[in-house]
Amino acid sequence: MAKADIKPKSIHHAKKWSDDVENLYRFQQAGYRDEFEYKQVKKVDMVECWPETGFVKKLQRRDNTFYYYDKQRECEDKEVHKVKVYVY
């Protein structure tokens, strides 16, 4: 299967916050499943991240509007259960 054809095998919702859940929250806020889909749609090799935390710094939505994120956590505890975790 080609890299561009990657589809998730299953999905579940996050139970508790983690660095990975934080980044998934940011991708899903911008309208993407996760980093794989973002790279596939936007045809980029790297996602801009904060060097201190490793969190996503900037994402471009499908309508070419940019989302900018802070260095600190943005996904509050009450939002964690809304984050979808895809398994490939």
Image (cartoon, rainbow, N blue to C red):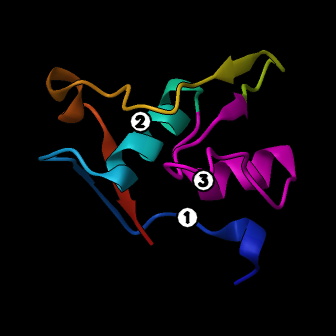
The residue to which callout 2 is attached is 25
Tell me residue 10's x, y (percent): 33, 63
Q: Is residue 84 magenta?
A: no
Label 1, on which residue? 7
Q: Residue at x 80, y 18 (%)?
A: 63
Would you say 5 lies left or right of 18 here?
A: right
Q: Which residue is mark 3?
A: 35
Specify the amino acid type for callout 1.
Lys
Q: Disc 2 or 3, which lies upstream in sequence?
A: 2
Q: Are marks 1 and 3 in contact (CB under 8 Å)?
A: no
- Looking at numbered disc 3 in the image, what kind of residue is underneath it? Glu
Callout in the foreground (1, 3): 3
- Magenta residues, dominant SS class: loop
Residue found 21% across the figure and 44% down from its top: 17
The residue range painted magenta reads 32-59
Q: Residue furthest front?
A: 52
The answer to whether the residue labelled 2 contacts the one labelled 3, judged by CB atoms less than 8 Å apart, is no
The Cα atoms of the two marked residues, 1 and 3, are separated by 12 Å
**52 left or right of 48?**
left
Position of 59 with respect to 74 (left or right) is right
Asked if 57 appears above or below 45 in the picture, the reply is: above
| Residue 34: in magenta span | yes
Viewer-nearest residue: 36 or 23: 23
Using the rendered view, name the quadrant where residue 22 is placed.
Answer: top left
Which SS class for mark 2? helix
Nearer to the camera, 35 or 49: 49
Instruction: Choose between 36 and 48: the one closer to the eye.
Output: 48
The C terminus - image quarter: bottom left
